[in-house]
Each structure stands twice: as structure tokens, then as C-alpha cells.
Image (cartoon, rainbow, N blue to C red):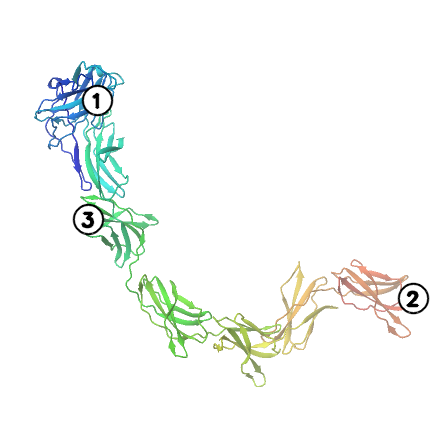
Amino acid sequence: MKRILSTILAIVMVLSVCSSLAFTASAEEAIEMTPEEMKVNYEVKTDGLKNGEITFDVYLAPEQLVKNAMLTVKFNDTVFDVVEEKTGAATALDADGDPYEIVSGLHESGIPVENKVPINNCYTFAFISSEGYKIGSSAKKFVTITLKLKSGKAGAVTGVDFYKGTHKDCIVENTIKNYSNFVALETPVVTSCWLENGALGFNWNAVTGAAGGYFVYKKVGNEFVTLANGISATSYKDSNNLVNGTTYTYAIASRDGIYGYPSMKYEFSVTYFAPPTVTIANASNGVNVKWTKVSSADKYLVYRSTLQNGVWSSWEVIGNALSTKLTYIDATAKKGVTYRYAVSAVIDNVETGYKASAELKFVPLITSLATPTAKTANTAKGITITWNAVENAEKYIVYRKTYNASTKKYSGWTALKTTTGLSYADTTVKIGTTYSYTVKAVNGSVQSSYTATKGLKYDIIPTVTIANASNGVKVTWTTVANATGYRVYSSTYNTKTKKWSSWTNRGTAASNKTTWTDTKAKSGTYYKYTVKAMNGSVGSSYKASTQTLFLAQPTVKIANNASGMKVSWNKIAGSKGYTVYRSEYVNGAWTSWKNMGTIKNGSTVSWVDKSVKSGTQYRYTVRTVNGNYKSTYKASSGLLYLAQPKTTVKAVSNGINVSWTQSAGSTGYTIYRMEYNAKTKKWSGWKKMGTAAASKKTWTDKSAKKGVTYRYTVKAINGKVASTYKASSSVKR
């Protein structure tokens, strides 16, 4: 019976975390065996293939190294499938004495594929270690290969041939390769590995001739599963649901690009440790970095990244801590700068990786604050509190206490406002009530001490202004916070005694009112006023307004005059004169008021504007004047000025001819006549005789009687507006 003995090299190294690995091979030279040195026998283990199994063993010479031996088994029948390959008592040893596993050239896992159909009845087995196999001296030195009869087949094995290299009958073009020049690849060796947040990775050396790439395996249960198949890279990262503190076993192998055989597997184990979870907070002396504990850590490295112009800088190591420490103070942090931090655990000189913390703007943690100095002042809106800025204060709290005039005691402190500013207006104060205030500086949970201000009575005086109005003196004042009303007082000046009267209460206006008009004021009288802000029956202090001389507003009338526009008005008591203003209607709008002059006589109540132009519309107003005091004014209605026509008459054969000068702006003319009674020697009244168009300037009175004396006049007309008129000389027909 012929037997074949083969061995396989496998390397297993277990790491506490992940470290550089090295593989040490035997330095002894390998000897390539020849077919004559192999003894092969086979036998039917059952009764004549009836139940279909055949087993044969391959022997190797003792104490020899087998290197790159390629053995081909050729059967004369195709009734067999390779079932399994069993190691006998033979052992394969490397330089360290570790046993190697058996590998077959038919499958990368080292075990022939079940029901693999041979090509041309050929099975090929290989000793593919570049380091070689050393066979011990025990009694049994063989590899047992068992084949099973295919279902429904019958027959016998008529011959088995073994070759170093490939049997000539097994070489079929495009079907099976020639393995005569096969040289097994070296096993890749892991050189370094690393841990990241949620992943672990490893690097290995490049293997010469590994044109078929590299294979990465991971042990799941008792079996290896393929993670990567034929990759060209010499590194790999596994991020598939890793569990913190769990050890994982991996293997890597290289494969040649000609024959497709893999090298021996390089096995190693790695324990995955998740990076620490980091929290950060401001401290008085820097940023306090804290992290969760990682078991087996030798030490921790602290990283920092800085936000610069909206971009995060690269991570830099700023410190390290012993495995017993879980905190670090970054004393180099600068106030106002934003940072983020990360921490990695170091185990056997390998880092676990890290994950970034949240970002934080460094502001030193404050343990004490200076006391603000507060000041108070009355304003129209309430009492205003101001204070100085306190270094490192984030905000301020304003407090108030109220004085009880009955008990003569202050109430307790009440918080009014939390603010980041340096002032606050207390608009809830009441007139006549005394208050005290204080301010605390705050930073987080730290608060300063406080100092109370002196009591301040809320007593704001309304600011009063007065002016002449059309119907009296108008009094206006500013509002005061929370006033329930405003009480108005007046005083008059006695020009004889040259003294002001006592204040007279003129009444109280509602809290939403800011004006009041003294409609009982008399023109030509001097007045002063003041206003108190009220809180029920309690009033504020007060201050007298400036004095004013009330001058009533004149009522103005205007009319066309023979020489211009006549402006007239009523006489105003206390007046020393009147100022007349005029406005013209131009292009659909009234012009601004033009000062036409001041009449320096309080008794004069009319004036004729001789500068007007016929056909132009005017309006006027008049102000009463006494020194610097003036009344209000009101515009008159507008009036079109029409010049008075100049009328001439002449007796003609058919009557009396009336002619006149034309007036600009006129739309027509009306002719009037009066008749002289020789008996009574009196003139009759004016009688309208007719009208003429604007373009006309003559008219003949054909109704005039011979021997009778007449007078005529003409009015320029535009709608309801008529010019003045003047009688002509007498004419007799």
C-alpha cells in the first residue's frame, strides 16, 4: 500500500491589544524529495469496492525536509471522489517545535473539496511551504487519503502513479496548469495594527510574487470566514459591529498569480477596546477634561483641536495621564478660544483611537465676583438704576425694597430683573414712595455680595410747556410713570401791583392726557402754569412754566378794493400791533405764507394790499403782536382779485356809448346805470343794464332817453366774485 504524508505550517499569536508581530522561520536548509524516496501503496478497505471506499497512504523518508513537492495521483477510473485527508502519527515541526496542519493544493483552506471532480482522472497534492516540512522519526509517517465510490458506480482501481511535478497525462491545455515550476509564496507577516472608534485594523509586509493578492479571514465560532478576497492592499480595517473588550481572531494569506495557490495562513488575535468617552467643562485654571476608564490601559493621551477662522485645526497631543487618572486640566487654554478634546487609551504601546468631545469656548470658571456699585435717579419713566461692570460677570440681578412710611421700615428684597446690561429702569414705582436698590453680579452659580443704595423718593416733576392757542392757552406736559392723573395750576400777573397771584387749581387731567387748554384765559393777560403728577391724593413736586401773554387770535376778512385787496380783522385786547401774511394760489396749490409787514398800532384793524395782481387768487392771515408775544392765526378763505374797471361814457346818435378798461382774470362784465331826476334833483339807485363777454370793452345803451342825464359803472365778474366799481361822469343824451 502506498501512502503520501504531507504537513502544513500555521502560526498563532495572541495579542493583549494589538502590537507588532514577527515570524521566525527555521534556518535549516530544505531538501527536495524525489519520487524514488516516496513509498506508495493502496488497498481496498472494504470488500472489493462493493461499498465504495479505497484508502491509500503516502510515506515520506524520516528526518527529511520536503520543500515545494508537487505530487500527482492519476487513477485509471473516474469512479472516486476525494472524501478526506487524515494525518497519521507523523508530525511536522517548525524551528520552534509547533505542529503544522496538513494542506492540499486543491483548496485554499487546506482540505480537498468534497465531490471535487478530477480532470483527466488526476488529483494533485502539494507541499507548498517555502520553509519546508520536517518529518519526525515515529513509526508511522504518512498521510491517509480516503476516496469514496460514486453513487451507482462500480469498478476497480487499475493503477496509481505518483510524480514529483505534474503527470504528463494530466496536462490538458486551458484545463490544468503545469506545476513543475511551482514555488510556494511566503506567508505575509503582520507588522502593526491599530484601534479606532468602532474599528480595528492591521498592516502586513508585502510578499514577492503575490500577484493574486491577499486574503483576510475572521474566525466566527470555529470556522474562518473570508473578509477580503484577493485585495492588493497590505492593510485592512474591520468595523463590523465590534464589541468593547472582545478578542477577535484573524488570519491573512498571500496567493500567487500563476497557479492560484495561497500561502500558509498567519493567525493572530486582537482585543478591541473602544476609545474613552470624553466630557469637558471650564475650570478656574483651564479646561477640565474627563473620560471614562478603559480596562488594561497603561496610560492615556489627551488630544486637542482649536477652532481658527471657522476651521478646526489638526489634532495635537497636549498631555498624558497615568492609567489611574481619568482627568486632565488644559492650563494652556486661552480665554475666548473654542476647543474640542479627545482621549485615547494606550495598551501595550498601541492606542485605542479616540472620538471628539463637544466643542467649548474657554471662559475661566469663576469662584468670586466683585460687588457692583449701584446709583439711582428719578426719571419720567421711573427710577433708573445704573452700576459699574464687574469682571467675569455674565449677568446682573437687580433687587428693590420699599419703605413703609407708616411703620418706618423697609420691606424685604425683591428681585426685579436679570440682565446683561449695566442699567435698569424700574417703571413700577409710585409717586411719593421711597425705594432702595441693590445689584448682584452673577457667573453661573457664583454671585457677588451686594450693597444697598440710599433710599430715593420717586418724585419726578413733569416738564411743562405753554403756548397761545386759538381758544386760550394750551398747556402740555411730559408723562410720569404710573401717575394716576395730572393736576394743573395757573397764576396771573397783576400789572398794577407787579406781582403774581397764588397758584390756582384748575383741575385734574386723566392719566392718559398730556395737554389741557385754559379756555378762560383773557387776551392781554400774563399767565404761568405748573403740573403735578398725582398718585391718588399724593402729588409730585412741581416747577412753574415760563410766562406767556395770552393774545387772542384775530378773525380775518378780505375783499376786493378799488386800489387792491382789503384785509380787515377784529381788535384784540393787549395788542400792540398786527402782522399780516399773504399766500397765493399758484399751479393748483397755495404758496407759503409771506410776511407783508407789521402794523404797529393795536387800534388799526384793516390794511389794503396794493401789490396784488388782477386774476390772481389770494388768502391772508393776521397775528396779534405785543413785543415777543404773538397770537395764533387762522387763514382767511381765498379770494380772486379783480381790478376795478375804469368807465367812460359818450352820447352817440343811437344812445349812450359805455366803454371800460379790461380786468385780467375776468370772465365777463356787468353794466349798471343810474338816472338823474330833474324835478327832485336826486339820482336813482343802480340798475343792472346788461352783461358783456370778457373780450368786450364797450356797450351802447340804446334805451337812454333824449334830454335825460345818466351815470354808468362796470363790474368785472368771475363766477360769484365781482370787482369794486366807480361811477362814471354824468352824460346827457
Measured Cα–Cα span from mark 3 to mark 1? 55 Å
Viewer-nearest of discs 2 and 1? 1
**Precedes in sequence: disc 3 or disc 1:** 1
Q: Amino acid at mark 1?
A: Val
Q: Amino acid at mark 3?
A: Lys
**Precedes in sequence: disc 3 or disc 2:** 3
- Contact between labelled residues 2 and 3, with CB atoms less than 8 Å apart: no
The number of discs equals 3
Q: In the displayed structure, would residue 4 be above or below residue 236? A: above
Residue on which disc 3 sits: 299
| Left or right: 571 as drawn, with respect to 334 | right
Q: In the displayed structure, would residue 246 be above or below residue 507? A: above
Residue on which disc 1 sits: 82
**Image quarter (top left, top right, bottom left or bottom right) of the N terminus:** top left
Helix, strand or loop for disc 2: loop
Q: Is residue 205 visible?
A: yes
Residue 25 - label: none
What residue sits 23% from the left and 33% below the top?
224
- Contact between labelled residues 1 and 3, with CB atoms less than 8 Å apart: no
